[in-house]
Image (tube, helix red, strand yellow):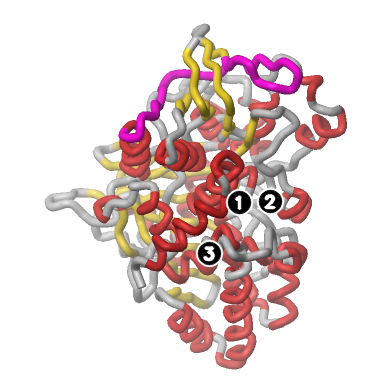
Amino acid sequence: MSKWDVLIIGSGISSLTCAALLAKRGKSVCVLEQYNKPGGYLHCFSRFGERFETGAHYVGAMGKGQPFRALLKYLDVYDDNLFVPLDTEGFDVFNFPGFQVKFPRGYDGVIGALSAQFPQEKTAIQAYFDMIRTVVNQFPTYQFNAASDIETPTEALETSVATVVRRLTSNLKLQCVLFSYCIHHGVAPEDIPFGFHAIVTDSLIRGAYGLKNGGDAVARKFVETIEKHGGSVRLNTRVARLVTRDKHIDEVVTENGETFAADWVISGIHPKAVFGLLSEPEVLSPAFRSRVANLKESTGIFGVYAACTLDLPLNPLRNYYYFGSDNPAAYLESTTPATPGAVFVSSGTRVLRPGQKTIPVSFHASSPIEWFEPWRATAYGARPQDYRALKNELAESIFALVERYQPGLRASVRQFVTSSPLTNLHFNGSEEGSSYGIYHSFQNTGARSLGPRTHIRNLLLTGQNCLFPGLLGSAVAALRTSGHLVGIKPILNELNQEMRNFT
């Protein structure tokens, strides 16, 4: 049996952040990953001679002196070769029936672009973004403010983004634009706390960057740093059982029979999954077990990964959002396979290679797992023709929506493959095939969230299910988790200094 200070289950960005931070601070750390490479939704894959991202399409707060870059530099993970700034004149392009809006980098640019599109709404637009700038400063683990007495800004987490926006404007088209970033957390505007939506919006407006060499390169850099500080990342190592005694994990047992022991165990996998590994589940109260079992999951995601001809009129340094409606009550939902509500489009190649013949383009839309329920028990790679037929129907409906705004899109697609919520289940073990974990509504965030601590004395949780989805949210969750072992205030002080080094 090998003994460590900290064992970490899973190797998504939250687990890797915990491992890098704790190893840097002198802890012996071992990461156990079931798959053959690390990274979770940082994973890339290759088809048709091109690289495609599965989940890490772009990230915010990456400008000089901004939180995510400062965190990666602090962890010795940041490298200019890993990231590329997106188009400052319009990194995100939103397409609605009858109008288009581009978001340039910076608040002044975004406010100016929206005010030009909605001149009667200038006051509301200015007020909305002023509120965002105010609210994000209230989150100490986003701004790395150890001096703050605010654990969580209550008002910002008790008011929905829908409430905030509708108080400011009755213009339905403007409401649609301001709700658009709900795509990145999968929560309806009525259900998402304004504070979390504000962080997503702020991070992207200030510093949207693409991944220059894919998410795999970022994961490899994390592993390099972890190993440099004496840690270990074990691949093809699926945890099968957590042996508990007196509300303490004594052993971690893998599928191949290896055993590990640690002072602390950190789980970066879904809470439902990790609590299902306990040898004595009765150590959890019936009320808590019921609460976890009944946690609502965010919707599944369907992906199309296409090799397109280079004459496709899409800028690889931009992301594109295509909406089937400008009705804010309905435009984010996919109600049937034939009618996607919204499609997010990006390229896995942000900088074209010399001699490149095609460009990889990813299309993602919401897709409830119920559509695929008949095939949940079937094996990956051996699913029947009717499953493949549904996937093709979904792909063509996604192409059709984009084609409304980009005529000729379908003709530019040379080859494509697809992924469904069942694909997510197979590769990442995500409940319900979601990319966003639990549904981060009022019932599951703030004071009601599953925090790092558990009923098991030496088991901590991390990851998007403990705070918020996305690379940034998951990494910040890791700070909170690691803070239980080495103290959060020293970490925040050092990170704050890292940000100041840029100014």
Mark earlier in primary sequence (2, 1): 2
What is the distance, in whole Å, between disc 1 and disc 3 at their CAs? 16 Å
The mark lying in front, picked from 1 and 3, is 3
Residue at the outermost left position: 355
Above or below, comparing residue 182 to residue 32 in the picture? below
Residue 31 x, y percent position in the rendering:
46, 28
Task: Say if mark 2 contacts mark 1, CB within 8 Å.
Answer: yes
Outermost bottom residue:
120
Residue 373 lies in the magenta stretch: no
Query: Which label is found at residue 440?
Result: 2
Q: Who comes first in sequence, dot 3 or dot 2?
A: 3
Q: Quadrant of residue 48?
A: top left
Q: Is residue 327 visible?
A: yes
Q: How many marks?
A: 3
Q: Amino acid at mark 1?
A: Phe
Q: Measuring 62% from the left and 42% from the top, which residue is drawn there?
A: 437
